């Protein structure tokens, strides 16, 4: 008899909470199905301003708009697209990061880093796109981040400026922030700021910092900048 009230309570809970639990399960299953449907059937599109658009080497040509796909250098695969106003004219442009398609084999054949291309793609008044500038030494190679993997974290683009943020290392970490600004008179992008930081992973607050800000008429042009040579890691 002592166990009867407990048994009644158990049956009551199972009977009254079975339906709400089923509703919750169905709701979660519906969300998962919608998510899968959107991933499989939704049309690929360029992302919002400042975001990274990623592709694999197999589907990059299919996902890129034709007018953008033709700008990919021969023998290269797109790793990311960053959107924003590069030349301060009110139209959206793109910073394209591309790596060599034979990067793995080239890396294995030499200890030297295999450079990646960073292309500045501007929009024309007629709606077409053109490569305004290219650098093969503005971003580190995909293996230059050490155990942290690809060191490229983000390229933010806005109001005639773009900033490259990179990070890597192991027990000792490093980060680098490089900014270029558009010079209307020269119609070119010039180095505005370059900063590096080193710190032990166990002591992140005890960092060694180095920064450089070009002055006068000797500012470095984007296509001449070498991330491996100037205040490098």
Image (cartoon, rainbow, N blue to C red):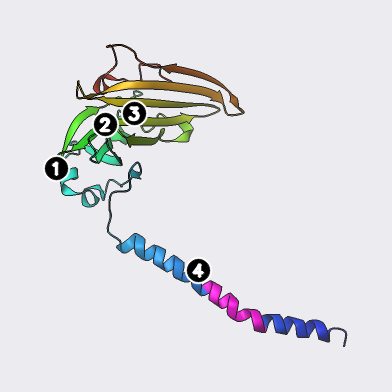
Residue on which disc 2 sits: 117
Q: CA distance from mark 4 to mark 2?
A: 43 Å
In the image, residue 148 lies at what x, y percent?
47, 34
Mark 3 and mark 4 residues within 8 Å of each other at the beta carbon: no
Residue 139 is marked as: 3
Q: Is residue 18 above or below residue 121?
A: below
Q: Quadrant of residue 69?
A: top left
Residue 28 is marked as: 4
Quadrant that contains the C terminus: top left
Secondary-structure class at tag 4: helix
Foreground pick, 222 / 148: 222
Q: Is residue 120 above or below residue 45?
A: above
Q: Is residue 51 above or below residue 164?
A: below
Q: Earlier in the sequence, mark 1 or mark 4?
A: 4
Mark 4 and mark 2 residues within 8 Å of each other at the beta carbon: no
Secondary-structure class at tag 1: loop
Foreground pick, 92 / 17: 92
Q: Is residue 11 above or below residue 50?
A: below
- Left of 185 or right of it: where is 220? right
Residue 15 is marked as: none
Residue on which disc 1 sits: 128
What residue is rendered at 26% in x and 31% in y? 117
What residue is rendered at 18% in x and 31% in y? 132
Most extreme residue toward the bottom is: 1
Q: Earlier in the sequence, mark 2 or mark 3?
A: 2
- Left of 113 or right of it: where is 146? right
Q: CA distance from mark 3 to mark 4?
A: 42 Å
Q: Quadrant of residue 191?
A: top left
């Amino acid at each position: 008899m002592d166990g009867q009230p407990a048994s009644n309570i158990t049956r009551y809970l199972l009977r009254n909470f079975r339906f709400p639990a089923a509703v919750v399960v169905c709701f979660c299953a519906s969300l998962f199905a919608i998510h899968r449907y959107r991933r499989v059937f939704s049309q690929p599109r360029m992302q919002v301003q400042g975001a990274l658009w990623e592709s694999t080497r197999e589907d990059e040509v299919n996902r890129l708009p034709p007018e953008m796909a033709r700008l990919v250098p021969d023998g290269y695969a797109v790793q990311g697209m960053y959107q924003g106003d590069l030349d301060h004219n009110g139209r959206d442009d793109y910073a394209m990061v591309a790596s060599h398609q034979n990067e793995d084999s080239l890396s294995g054949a030499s200890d030297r880093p295999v450079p990646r291309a960073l292309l500045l793609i501007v929009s024309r008044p007629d709606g077409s796109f053109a490569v305004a500038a290219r650098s093969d030494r503005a971003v580190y190679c995909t293996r230059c981040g050490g155990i942290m993997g690809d060191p490229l974290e983000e390229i933010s683009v806005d109001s005639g400026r773009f900033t490259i943020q990179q990070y890597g290392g192991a027990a000792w970490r490093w980060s680098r922030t490089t900014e270029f600004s558009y010079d209307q008179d020269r119609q070119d992008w010039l180095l505005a700021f370059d900063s590096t930081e080193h710190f032990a992973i166990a002591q992140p607050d005890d960092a060694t910092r180095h920064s450089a800000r070009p002055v006068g008429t000797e500012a470095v042009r984007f296509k001449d900048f070498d991330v491996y040579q100037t205040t490098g890691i």
